[in-house]
Image: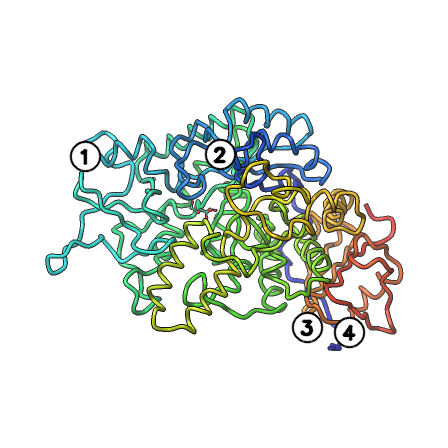
Amino acid sequence: MTTTAPSQTQKQSPGRQGPPTRAWWKEASIYQIYPASFVDSNGDGLGDIRGVISKLDYLHSLGVDAVWLCPIYESPQKDMGYDIANYRAIHAPYGTLEDVEELTGALHARGMKMVMDLVVNHSSDQHAWFRESRSSKGNPKHDWYIWRAPRFVDGKRLPPNNWASCFGGSAWAYEEARGEYYLALFCPEQPDLNWENPDVVREVHDIMTFWLEKGVDGFRMDVINMISKTPGFPDAAVSLPGREWQPAFEHHSYGPRLNEFLKGLREVLDRYDAFAVGEMPCVNQDSQVAAVVAAERKELNMIFQFDIVDMDIGDDGKFSPRKWDANTLKNIVNRWQTFMYDVDGWNALFLENHDQARSVSRFTKHRPEHRTLAAKMLATFIGTQAGTLYIYQGQELGMTSLPETWSMDQFKDIESLNLHAEAVERFKDNKEAMEIFMRDLRKKARDNARSPMQWNGEKNAGFSVAKPWMRVNDNYPEINAQQQHGEGGSVLSYWRKLLQARKDYRDSLVYGNFELVQDGHEAVICFKRGGGYCADAWVVVNFTDSEQSWRPPAELRAMIASGKQVLGNYDDDVVLEGDVLQLRPFESRVLIAQGAV
Ligand code: GLC
């Protein structure tokens, strides 16, 4: 148990005087669907679009305002649809264009919005453009992708530089027909498009227009920060000594023409009042983020910034550990929350998605009896910050990562499989290093998020009548939507209340500014949403499974005495003992002034 000195809030955002301008995409809570694992309507073991349509009432009653569908386009599925072979056609096992139109119409009929994934850093190698591009040096699409001559060292043919692929190995693949390498920052079946070619840029604009004309309300733009690369393709600095291929983010995470390209995309969006959230790994310098999201820049509306989901990644690659605590998290949150107010940008709030492990397993150390409390604490923590809130399917149930007992043959993801194979080779004489790697892979593998949605306690968790494409998490009898639906104390009910609270107290919880209580406490996170133009709301969460004795600032003590509770994961009222709050495991409270709206 820890008791801390009286704490102070510090005003961090002097730049802005009034509230941010309002917009539908700022107020929306967006539910992310991974189509393969959501609902299988036709009994082939794979989720599909008609399955999504069948669950719209569920989503509406959850209180989300929009759905973001991960890629559903025609694809050989080397990377679960992030390898697109035709941007205007649907992957047949998912359904048809008519199904997508019906889904869009059904969302709109419920007052909800439709967001699609736009994957245009790369296509599939099966796209007609690439088939043509790779066929010869003289073909009309010869420079739609990034081609370079080999290097020869001691007569040996080598890729043009030392860049590593994000999925392991070199970022270059060789094509006999041209005698050249092409760049593929992910897997070789995902060749990078050449944005230096104006025809490629025009084509991307046309693809966006095609979908916007169909009524789509916005895009999540996949690794959109990588579309511009350092001219000349110089070697990357060596950050992983002894390895042949080096991460090259300094050359492809924020290239010289990125801002220009983003402005072009924004012009298309603005014709339709549509919005874009850009996925931007490895972008965290103030000036770079501000240049993309500051409203006056007219580039992206917001970005997925990776500081939280990268905070437990060590120096030796994704599956190496790093220690963190509540203060690490507080520093990250405080930085971006206040920053967006100062630059007139906007945050995209997320703890989970299809590339991240389940948050309750990854970010809380809990005993099974505390799982529900821990999941509600995380919901409170992320869902009361300023920004657009993203909820990944199953997060609203507190779904967990895969069981520790599963062997590697249950893992499906190309990233996990490639990096695992690399590690087996690299650590063949180092058992301890391999064990550390495996522990971390289990903690962070993308597979953790991709097991089928747990709808009920029946066969295959109600996801499919057939054998699912990926095994269902063993805990579906205890964690499923049906069982949580009518239960007031469930994680699902809590998310419903949280999403409703963001609507009821929109001025404070969506638009209010952010002031962190900076007391250095290693377990308790507390912040105020307010700013003088709306009622103050206070959020306090205990991030640990142990009891914490914590002294709130005077202003919060007054609020506890006079305010009302908007949300809490314990049934009783919040009570001060003298000046101190005794916070139980994962205890979370949101308070607001009486009479506030
Ligand atoms: C993004 C996607 C991820 C995909 C990668 C390559 O990070 O979210 O799933 O593998 O881009 O498209």
Give the label, 2 or 3, closer to the camera: 2
Q: Report how far apart the C-alphas of labels 2 and 1 lie in the structure.
A: 30 Å
Query: Circle 3 is placed at which residue position?
Result: 521
Q: Can residue 440 be seen in this view?
A: yes
Q: Report how far apart the C-alphas of labels 3 and 1 lie in the structure.
A: 62 Å
The residue positioned 52% from the left and 37% from the top of the image is 46
**Type of amino acid at the residue the image marks with label 4:** Ser
Q: What coloring was used for the rendering?
A: rainbow
Q: Is residue 430 or residue 471 the one in the foreground?
A: 471
Give the label, 2 or 1, closer to the camera: 2
Mark positioned earlier in the residue sequence (4 or 1) = 1
Q: Is mark 3 on a helix, strand or loop?
A: loop
* Mark 3 residue crowding within 10 angstroms, few (<14) / some (14–19) / many (20+): many
**Type of amino acid at the residue the image marks with label 2:** Ile
Q: Is mark 4 on a helix, strand or loop?
A: strand
Mark positioned earlier in the residue sequence (2 or 3) = 2
* Tag 2 and tag 3, C-beta contact below 8 Å: no
* Tag 3 and tag 1, C-beta contact below 8 Å: no
Query: Circle 1 is placed at which residue position?
Result: 136
Query: Circle 4 is placed at which residue position?
Result: 549
* Mark 4 residue crowding within 10 angstroms, few (<14) / some (14–19) / many (20+): some
Mark positioned earlier in the residue sequence (3 or 4) = 3
Query: Circle 2 is placed at which residue position?
Result: 72
Ligand 1 within 8 Å of the CB at mark 2: no
Q: Is mark 2 on a helix, strand or loop?
A: loop
Q: In this view, does 17 lie above or below 500?
A: below
Give the label, 3 or 4, closer to the camera: 4
**Type of amino acid at the residue the image marks with label 1:** Ser
The residue positioned 59% from the left and 37% from the top of the image is 464
